[in-house]
Image (cartoon, rainbow, N blue to C red):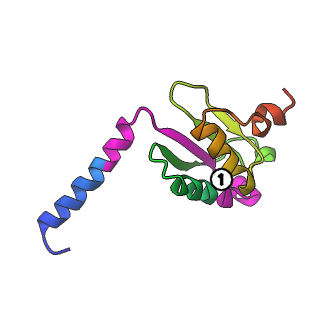
Amino acid sequence: MKSLAELEAIRQKTLDKVSMRKDADDSIRVVVGMATCGIAAGARPVMLKFLDEIQKRSLKNVTVSQTGCIGMCRLEPMLDVIVPGKEKVTYVKVNPDMVARIVAEHIVNGRVVTEYTIGAAEGK
């Protein structure tokens, strides 16, 4: 850092990024359960695979974040895919091999991978 002006430029760039995230109504969110139960069940490699797939496909309207315990430890690793204007979809017992299909079918093409969802796991 050489000057206050340089610091201000960094600050403004960061604020612009935060503002874009808030204003992006079309942003798809992937929320991975990363409490101890999720981590123990393998949520970290799942989250890293999502980040990799999204970067590989250059998807700009998708954010990946983490949350605490979702509440059904027996179904971990769990994650939600939240598409604006549509019902939240919860995927359960997710492993890294399932991620590419979820990204391709659900996030890119808008088709839920039903057999990976909580409804399929619970026999509904």
User: In the picture provided, is 60 more to the left or to the right than 71?
Assistant: left
SS at badge 1:
loop
Q: In which quarter of the image is the N terminus?
A: bottom left
Residue 101 in the image: state x and y as whole percent.
69, 46
Residue 75 in the image: state x and y as whole percent.
79, 44
Q: How crowded is mark 1: few (under 14 residues within 10 Å), some or many (20 or more)?
A: some
User: In the picture provided, is 11 more to the left or to the right than 115?
Assistant: left
Q: Is residue 115 above or below residue 11?
A: above
User: In the picture provided, is 108 more to the left or to the right than 72?
Assistant: left
Please name whichever residue, 98 or 48, is drawn nearer the observer in this view of the structure: 98
Please name whichever residue, 116 or 55, is drawn nearer the observer in this view of the structure: 55
- The span shown in magenta is 17-46
Please name whichever residue, 28 or 59, is drawn nearer the observer in this view of the structure: 59
User: What is the quadrant of residue 111 in the picture?
Assistant: top right
Q: Which amino acid does label 1 sit on?
A: Ala
Residue on which the image places disc 1: 35
Q: State the residue at coordinates (77%, 40%).
A: 116
Q: State the residue at coordinates (13%, 66%).
A: 4
Q: Does the magenta stretch include residue 24?
A: yes
